[in-house]
Image (cartoon, rainbow, N blue to C red):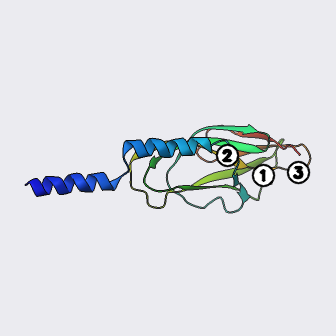
Amino acid sequence: MKILITLMLLSSTLACKTMKNRKKDQQIINTNELKADKKAVLGDINEVGDSINILNASIEGNNLTLEVSYSGGCETHEFKLIGSPMIAKSLPPIRSIVLVHLGKGDDCRQLITEKLSFDIRDFAYTVSESEIYLNLKGFEKRILYKFKP
């Protein structure tokens, strides 16, 4: 019986990171959260990813910052922001975009909240100062993007 309990404790300890290590990982994520180190691209907006909640979206200059939450904690997750090459003709025009979450099969259940920042220059309507609405799948409001040369 003692052996069974010991094995159960050992396996649960190895299954996921300790709370101390998780907090340390979150601190690393938070130090990089405002850098636009990811570049948004035009492509297939029907690409499927893992579940994600988009909590907030804001634009500063040519960077779109998204506050997101998802479950995980044991693997490094990747994100892609993809915009449709087609735009809807309106004033200002509208471009559909999607955030693709690649969780890499992470089965841990910690709720992660993270800020992601993307360079969205490829989503601009023209190269001069222009406006376009970005219709982000999973986010209820349209986002007005004014391109800054």
Q: Are marks 3 and 2 in contact (CB under 8 Å)?
A: no
- Can residue 68 be spotted in the picture? no
Label 2 with label 1: CB-CB less than 8 Å: no
Q: What residue did someone put label 2 on? A: 117
Give the CA distance from mark 3 to mark 2.
22 Å
Horizontal relation, residue 18 to residue 38: left or right: left
Q: Secondary structure at mark 2?
A: strand
The picture places residue 48, in percent across and down from the top left corner, at 55, 60
Q: Which residue is mark 1?
A: 123
Which residue is disc 3 drawn over?
Answer: 126
Q: Earlier in the sequence, mark 3 or mark 2?
A: 2
Residue 9, numbered circle: none
N-term-proximal mark, 2 vs 1: 2
Q: Amino acid at mark 2?
A: Ser
Choose between 37 and 54: the one closer to the eye: 37
Q: Position of residue 117 (x, y in %)?
A: 67, 46
Q: Check disc 1 and give the amino acid type.
A: Phe
Element assignment for label 3? loop
Find residue 8 and report its image quarter: bottom left
